[in-house]
Amino acid sequence: MNILAIDTTSEFGSLALRSKGETAAELTIDSSTGYGHLILPAVQNLLNEANLRLQQIDCFAAASGPGSFTGVRVGLGTTKGLAEAMGKPAVGISNLRALASFGKTDRRGVLLDARRGQVYAAIYNAGLELVSPEVVAKLNEWLEGPGKEAEEFVSQNAAGPRYLAAAVAFCAELDQKHWTDPAALDANYVRRSDAFGSWKEA
């Protein structure tokens, strides 16, 4: 099984190719000015490194956000286009879930900067299943609520993982039952209204 994954949701962009249950190739494409002009040449370079052809990809995966609006759309658009052209399925993977794959415990608090003093946050278990829903909230509010259940924290910063494409490919392999028509892919924009859900109402 060959999975090609793309993450252009932040300035730390990356692509990865997962084959036979492991990462066969990975490529970083850091950019603060956008990925539109970089992504297709990077795909070809990745395939060359793995000695594979586009026709050999079984599923195309994209980091679906939350993240940069433009970056999310570039990654999803490229993934949709490649999957449709090849007649193959596609899948979108939450950035928070991809981050959770770097954890070690059964209650993994994952955090992404949402700016303006807020974070995107969630808790996943060791099976990368949601324990507490993905929300956007002030960090201290979340830590005093659902965050209390976390046994560890994983974030995409200088001390944590920056490049997520290999993790996206790994999650895609776990999610074969969710592989779908590429036209069905959509962005994962966690809305503020979600932040005041069950724990605020309890």
Image: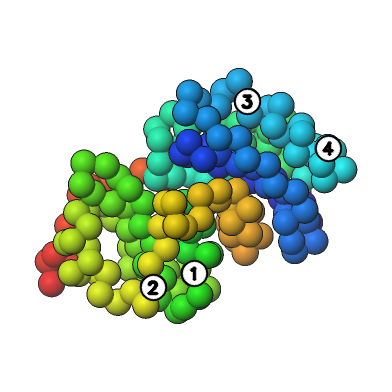
On residue 103, the disc is 1
Distance CA(mark 1)–CA(mark 4): 31 Å
**Closer to the N terminus: mark 2 or mark 1?**
1
At label 1, which amino acid type do we have?
A: Gly
Query: Element at badge 3?
Result: loop
At label 2, which amino acid type do we have?
A: Glu
At label 4, which amino acid type do we have?
A: Asn
- Residue position for label 2: 152
Disc 2 vs disc 1: Cβ atoms closer than 8 Å?
yes
Distance CA(mark 4)–CA(mark 3): 16 Å
**Closer to the N terminus: mark 4 or mark 3?**
3
**Closer to the N terminus: mark 1 or mark 3?**
3
Residue 106, compared with residue 91, is above or below; it is below
Tell me, yes or no, if residue 144 can be seen here. yes
Residue pushed farthest right? Answer: 51
Q: Residues within 10 Å of mark 2 (few under 14, many from 20)?
A: some
Q: Nearer the viewer, residue 188 or 21?
A: 21
